[in-house]
Image: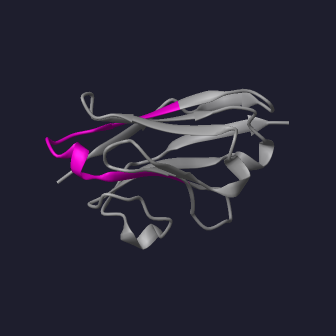
Amino acid sequence: QVQLVESGGGLVPAGGSLRLSCAASGRTFSAYAMGWLRQAPGKERQFVAGITSNGVRTTYLDSVKGRFTIARDNAKNTVYLQMDNLLPEETAVYYCAAERARWPTMSLQEYDYWGQGTQVTVSS
């Protein structure tokens, strides 16, 4: 069982930055690939970024490449999402999720555990 708690969301102007954190419970955090996903109002939830269980490899949604950075600290059971140059259309609830696997997946159905989400609002 893994419990995930996100933090760091808020209101930021367009072009601004936020750093999201996701703290995980349990001793097996390093066995899970981690992902950040988001859901905008009226839209489907989408994959944003993922990181392998050992933190060596990352993958991103094309539209966030070069602006978002996912990282993890297995000693602290925490995964991060640094978001720079945010756009108003990226207003959404951001979720972290854990998959019992080495590599992260873009498929939402493959994630085993989800956090409750944190609201990110980007004003224009």
Quarter location, residue 61: bottom right
Left or right of 122 on screen, residue 93: left
Query: Does 99 sit above or below residue 69?
Result: below
Q: Where is residue 80 shown, x and y percent of the image?
A: 46, 35
- Relative to 25, does residue 105 appear above or below in the rendering? below
Q: Quadrant of the C terminus?
A: top right
Would residue 95 appear left or right of 85 to someone viewing this image?
A: left
Task: Identify the magenta region.
Answer: 20-37
Extreme residue toward the left, this view: 27
Residue lying furthest front? 56
Residue 3: percent from left, percent from top: 25, 46
* Residue 104 screen position, x and y as percent: 41, 59
Residue 27 quadrant? top left
Q: Nearer the viewer, residue 103 or 41?
A: 103
Quarter in which the N terminus is drawn: bottom left
Q: Give residue 56's position: percent from left, percent from top.
A: 40, 43
**Most foreground residue, 77 or 51:** 51
The residue shown at (22%, 51%) is 31
